[in-house]
Amino acid sequence: MRKILYIAITLSFIALMVLVIPIFCSVPAKLNLLNTIPSAPAPYDDLPQHPVAPNALKNMFGINAYEWNFLQNPYNLNDPLHIYEPKMNLIKTFSGVRHYLDWEKIEPAEDSFTFNPARSGGWNYDAIYERCKQDNIEVLVCLKNCPPWIYKTYPAGMQGGENVPAPFGLNREDPASYIAQAKAGFQVAARYGSNKNINHALVTVDGKPRWTADPVNEVKIGMGVIKYIECDNERDKWWRGDAAKQTGREYAANLSAFYDGNKGKLGKNVGVKTADPNMQVVMCGLAAADTKFVQDMIDWCKQHRGYKPDGSINLCFDVINYHIYPNDNRQHANKQSTRGVAPELTEAGQVANNFVNLANSLRQHPEVWITESGYDINAQSPQRAMAVAGKTALETQGDWILRTALLYNRHGIKRTFFYQLFDDNTSAVQYSTSGFADDKTLARRPAADYILQTTNLVGNYQYKATINQYPLVDVYTLGNKTMYVLMIPDEKGRTGNYTLNLGSAKSIIVHSLNIGANVMTATKEPTVNGKFNMLASETPIFVEAAN
């Protein structure tokens, strides 16, 4: 009886193995069976179908900042005129700065412009822009918010700096309603743009000193330090009510005035392009990341600005722009997020596709930028980066920020500016703790370390292709040099293997991110017939042939 039972058990075991062994054998060798999932999580499975024009990776490493991030010396708060070098050394981590410039700072009273020193705050904007130019940092000036002399035209209960930039009661689809803001755009472009051949009578500053021995403003023309200017910020701000929210058509009218004085109809000192035809006008970053808003702008331009001789629509913007903070808001009925999410696991890639496809449908093929994105580190924030598998929230923030930049470059976005250089405060309110450095010690957080190290290694490399989706393997090239970037697009602390084929290379160099350092750690490894089995994790790793 025992013998029969033994034989039965043996036969059952053999049958089981016949079923199981083929299953294990069918698993690709490049996957780690113990700690991976079989495919990239939806919805990121689909890579962009549109062609992606070459773009240097460093362009994805911009930061949002304010004038006091450059000028405010903590040891001399009465000096807002000079660059504070320790802060400047930190800012040089980034390839670009989106500078939030409040309109009232340069025009505290109507037709009274001040830039150095600004009558409101005493800031020296010349010093900021000249220094960024010197240090090869591209500046996007975001001229935003209404000055008091505009928003005080609204009824008392509707007044606020984020109001629509036109006096109360005017037609919001008439470009002439926005002439005051468009005049400010002209003055900024005339001073900081590249055109030196401007009628000096059109450029004005308030030359009165504030007190005895106070420096006075001087007219300057064509300083050549600014290429890009953004017309306001998040004009689709539904949460501020009708006084602050514009439709796509209303914003297009606003932008037409700001762009070129509504095709020159509003005067010789109105509009950015009137002052400097070379300056690029960036539409405001959209809070809702909705292409319909942009399509409504395009339709307004068709109707009111018409077409150019080449048949293209006479658009009133050069760059399409939106904001997106990857989180779990779409998982909840009330659309309120409870935490940040790894970028590849959200709609971020598909939204990028939607905007790039819209841009490519236009004859001009305008670039698409993202001027706000990021993650908090406060453990209660609805936009927080999580502590993942032994990593702190700061380390996860670093992983997700770098992978966000790689994702957007992969999908054809041309510039990204992260929010922001320092924390606003330590609260759990979303975006309050999205900083990249400590505002007191000026120490970089891992996200800034990763950006600096990646820039130093491959900042000028351009995205070429994605050759695998799990692990994600991107290929970057610079001339005849090739760099492979490997990462797991997840948030569980997972790892996975991928066999790189480097042709005839006898060895490779593995570059690993290194918290607290300026450069990555480099390790040389031998290949086997030009192949190397690489272990990837949720922290990107960079690999190249040693020769």
Image (cartoon, rainbow, N blue to C red):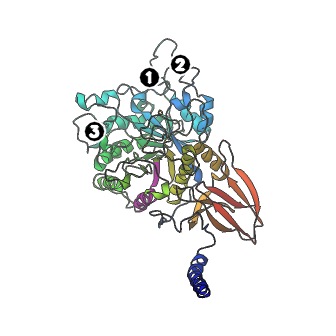
Q: CA distance from mark 3 to mark 1?
A: 26 Å
Q: Residue furthest top?
A: 212
> Where does label 1 land, which residue?
119
Can you tell which of label 3 and label 2 is closer to the viewer?
Answer: 2
Task: State the CA–CA distance, disc 3 to disc 2.
Answer: 38 Å
Q: Which residue is mark 3?
A: 177
Circle 2 SS class: loop
**Which sits in the foreground, 152 or 428?**
428
Quarter occupied by the N terminus: bottom right
What is the x, y in percent for residue 30? 63, 69
Task: State the separation of the CA atoms marked 2 and 1.
Answer: 14 Å
Return the mark for residue 373. none
Q: Residues within 10 Å of mark 3 (few under 14, many from 20)?
A: many
Can you say whether 405 is above or below 188 in the image?
Answer: below
- Sequence-first disc among 3 and 1: 1
Closest to the observer: 71 or 361?
Answer: 71
What kind of residue is marked 1?
Arg
* Label 3 with label 2: CB-CB less than 8 Å: no
Query: Is 285 positioned to the left or the right of 455 in the image?
Result: left
Which one is closest to the eye, mark 3 or mark 1?
Answer: 1
Does residue 264 appear anywhere in the picture? Answer: no
Q: Nearer the viewer, residue 388 or 329?
A: 388
Residue 323 on image: x %, y %: 42, 48
- Residue to which mark 2 is pinned: 78
In the image, what residue occupies the spot 67% across and 67% down? 500
Chain part drawn in magenta: 348-370
